[in-house]
Amino acid sequence: MELSVVGISKSFNSIGDGETISALKDISFKVPEGRLICIVGPSGCGKTTLLRIISGLDKPDRGRIILDEAEITTPRKEIGYVFQEPGLLPWRTVLRNVEFGLEVAGVHRNQGRLKALLFLELVELKGFEQFYPKEISGGMKQKAALAMSLVMEPKVLLMDEPFVALDSQTRNYLQEVLLRAWEKTGCTVIFVTHNVDEAVFLGDEVICLTSRPAEIGKRLEVDIPRPRERTGSELNSIRREILFFLEDERKKSLHST
Ligand SMILES: Nc1ncnc2c1ncn2[C@@H]1O[C@H](COP(=O)(O)OP(=O)(O)O)[C@@H](O)[C@H]1O
Ligand SMILES: [Mg+2]
């Protein structure tokens, strides 16, 4: 199973002045099964647009998304999505939130419950099953959102800056929870972030996008065994390379405006 992003381009017509905004320009890459790749790029460059196209929520102007030799044109259960906002249903407990997708898919109630409990344990939320979203912290909400996606057993999980609102310690902890869950499930993960530390800590590879229109500016393998040391010298040299790249992009975009 491999995910192929083939020659994706996308523009938007901005409302009002009728100007066309080119968001993505000829983006192509492949993600082998089970790999965790991170995508970094300047704010507003087109990262969310790219994820939405990969998920089938939006259509590209040009290009195709291929999963298992089939083209993705609409959302499918094989592709999960974790958003910046956890998106839990406030009137349901954590457990009932995780069961929700299974209910909709027609999974038998007892079977759904067992599975939901298993995935809650996987994201380290055991003991919080009966809490309501308003009773738990932001980090716990994101773990519940992760369980909601993983319980559907997607082949590919798309994550759009899921930890951006968390304090740095909680963020570090959730990165570790994600890595443990990823290693157990073996699903492919595409993780978007503008945080370089996060990208090099998590990814097998980091794809760097340019300023808008986003093109692939750089691809870096992070061939460092896990568990990784956040401040290790190998990670630091990759981090530095990405930071230089992003700084160059920032300067270029300043000159062009
Ligand atoms: N539905 C839309 N209509 C018009 N413009 C959009 C739409 N979605 C995104 N854009 C524009 O496309 C660009 C990229 O947006 P986005 O993908 O959200 O960036 P990022 O996630 O990298 O911050 C931005 O300039 C944004 O304003
Ligand atoms: Mg975004």
Image: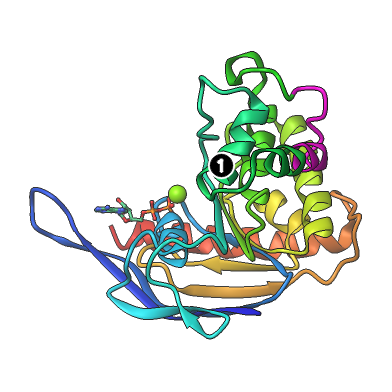
Residue 144, how many percent across, how many down?
Answer: 66, 34
Position of residue 212 measured from the top left corner of the image (x, y, whole percent):
37, 63
Element under label 1?
Answer: helix
Identify the residue shown where x is 83% and y is 59%. 183
In which quadrant will I find the N terminus?
Answer: bottom right
Residue 202 covered by magenta stretch: no
Q: In the visual, does 249 lie left or right of 110?
A: left
Q: In which quarter of the image is residue 97?
A: top right
Residue 124 lies within the magenta run: yes
Q: What segment is highlighted magenta in the picture?
A: 117-128
The amino acid type found where label 1 is placed reads Glu
Q: How many labels does the image show?
A: 1
Quarter of the rendering containing residue 177: top right
Is 137 in front, or is 154? 154
User: Viewer-proximal residue, 147 or 188?
Assistant: 147
> Residue at 55% of width from left, 35% of height from top?
86
Instruction: Pinpoint residue 4: horizontal percent, then vertical percent.
Output: 54, 80
Instruction: Look at the picture and state if 14 lies above or below 147.
Output: below
- The residue lying furthest to the top in this view is 135
> For this view, does 117 lie left or right of residue 156?
right
> Badge 1: few (under 14), some or many (20 or more) residues near its Cα, within 10 Å?
some
Residue beneath label 1, please?
103
